Image (cartoon, rainbow, N blue to C red):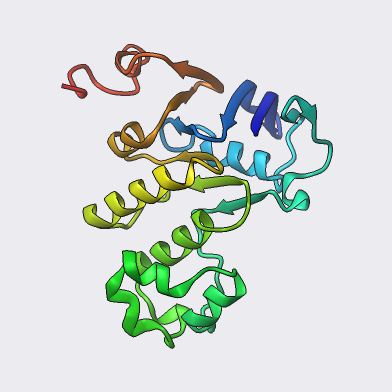
Amino acid sequence: MILEIDNVELYFKEKCILQGIYLKGEIGQVTSILGSNGCGKSCLLNIIFGNLKPKYKLIRLNNKPILKPLYRTKLVAYLPQHHFIPKAMKLILVFKMFNINWYDFIIYFEAFEIYKNHKFGNLSGGERRIVETYIILRSHRKIILLDEPFSHLAPLQIETFKNIISEEKHQKVIILTDHMYQHIIDVSDHLYLLKNRHIKPIKDLKDLEDFKYLSTGSLN
């Protein structure tokens, strides 16, 4: 499966946020978007998902235009920056609701075994992020959109999720963004830089310094 987003133009009132955006994701390849805070990365993911309507966009799946929002196709799962699981729901019910195996989860995150019957809202912010990121990654959807999946996580937890992403990419289109650029670089097959309303494919990591996203010497 190949997902393409083309000619995206987004305005908030008279201000242009995104212009002429083209992005491609495909099964077997992790596609990542880098960019400074407020540059429009989250907006772009929301446009792909279908809950933000730009002035113009064209979305294609395997070269066929998709005219309705992707979330209506049941092909896509989206991890937003905010929590989306009800606070009052017990953890074991969350996994049943999303049809995700609880016992597989605690193989990766053993410390959660004692939380099986805890309410989601009783977990810390980082713990909630782990649960939500895992559920989205392991969902049975073919397109996975991740908005800052590594936020609020400890280094070991980030490494675990990088391994899960590497596993899941073989059967899913994965598009993600995060401000933790080194982790993004590690896990990605294709990199894009979103800057000044436009998006640039990154063929060489030194381009990130040339485009002033990273300071000179950051990659040494």
Please state the horizontal and vertical placement of residue 15, each as a whole percent of the image. 64, 28
| Residue with the most extreme bottom position | 117
Q: Which residue is rendered at x = 55% and y = 45% of the image?
A: 145
Who is closer to the viewer here, 14 or 93? 93
Q: Which residue is rendered at x = 68% and y = 30% of the image?
A: 10
Q: Which residue is rendered at x = 44% and y = 25% of the image?
A: 191
Who is closer to the viewer here, 208 or 25? 25
Q: Looking at the rendering, which quadrant does residue 22 occupy?
A: top right
User: In this rendering, would 155 be left or right of 45?
Assistant: left
Please state the horizontal and vertical placement of residue 171, each as a whole percent of the image. 55, 43
Please state the horizontal and vertical placement of residue 143, each as a whole percent of the image. 61, 44
Please tell me whether residue 136 is drawn above or below residue 176 in the rendered image. Answer: below
User: In this rendering, would 156 be left or right of 148?
Assistant: left
Please tell me whether residue 163 is drawn above or below residue 216 in the rendered image. Answer: below
| Residue with the most extreme right position | 67
Q: Quadrant of the N terminus?
A: top right
Task: Please indicate, yes or no, whether residue 113 appears anywhere in the rendered image.
Answer: yes
Q: Looking at the rendering, which quadrant does residue 203 occupy?
A: top left
